[in-house]
Amino acid sequence: MDDTGHENPASVPPPDDPFVHDDLPLHDSVLESELSPAPPRDDLDADHIHKVTHLRRTAHRSRGYLLIGSAFCAVLGVQLIWNSVGRFRGGYNVIAAAYLMAAAVLLALAWRAFGRAQQFKREADASTLSDPKSPPDLSQLSDGSQSWKNLEDMK
């Protein structure tokens, strides 16, 4: 109890959120800056070019790793099939069946890794530029037939 006879409120543990949430309304200038459209992105910006280059390089590297892993799993699966045939001939049917199951898992992994590698290939080859909203205006361009006339005028 405090001096006035009221009980103290129960202590509330501090929230796990490290940020302070303010209940005050935002200023008009802050609100306007959040609502205003972002400036158009420049596709020739150096940071954008570095980002696109890094993403493509990463996609090619990941594709290479997946192709190598796929080949490794496929070769190991074929080797296990070969070993299981020898075990079946020797009368070790349980071990041979285990080899066949492991080979099936490895071949499935190889197939999945190969499919993912194809997806990385499509991602790396995709253009980052969006299609134009309207077709280009080619009416002001000439067909090139005036070039010969320009050469004759130079004489």
Image: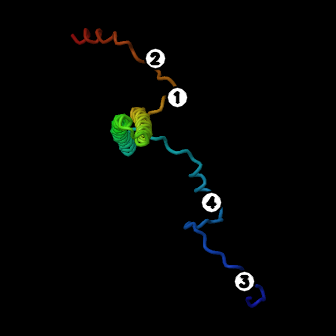
Instruction: From the top left corner, tell me how far across and down residue 93 is, in percent.
Output: 42, 39
Tag of residue 133: 1
Q: Is residue 78 visible?
A: no
Instruction: Find residue 86 and report its image quarter.
Output: top left
4 vs 1, front mark: 1
**SS under mark 2:** loop
Judged from this view, the residue extending furthest toward the left is 155
Decide if residue 91 is in sight here: yes
State the residue in front, 107 or 40. 107
Instruction: Choose the circle earlier in sequence order: 1 or 3.
Output: 3
Q: CA distance from mark 1 to mark 2?
A: 18 Å
Q: CA distance from mark 1 to mark 3?
A: 65 Å
- In the rendered structure, find residue 8 and report the number of the disc placed on it: 3
Q: Residue at x 57, y 47 (%)?
A: 36
Residue at x 41% of width, y 36% of height? 107
Q: Nearer the viewer, residue 26 or 124?
A: 124
As shown in the figure, which amino acid type bears the numbered disc 2?
A: Ser
Disc 3 residue type?
Asn
Counting from the top left corner in percent of width and height, residue 81 is at 37, 35
Q: Is residue 72 left or right of residue 139?
A: left
Q: Secondary structure at mark 3?
A: loop
Residue 42 image point, x, y percent: 43, 40
- Could you tell me how far apart the alpha carbons at marks 4 and 2 are, in whole angstroms? 50 Å
For marks 1 and 3, give the one nearer the viewer. Answer: 3
Q: Is residue 146 above or below residue 21?
A: above
**In what element is the residue under mark 4?**
loop
Tag nearer the camera, 1 or 2: 1
Q: From the viewer's perspective, is the residue at label 3 or at label 2 nearer?
A: 3
**Residue type highlighted by circle 4:** Leu
Q: Which mark is residue 139?
A: 2
- Crowd around label 2: few <14 · some 14–19 · many ≥20 (10 Å): few
In the image, which is nearer the foreground, mark 3 or mark 4?
Answer: 3
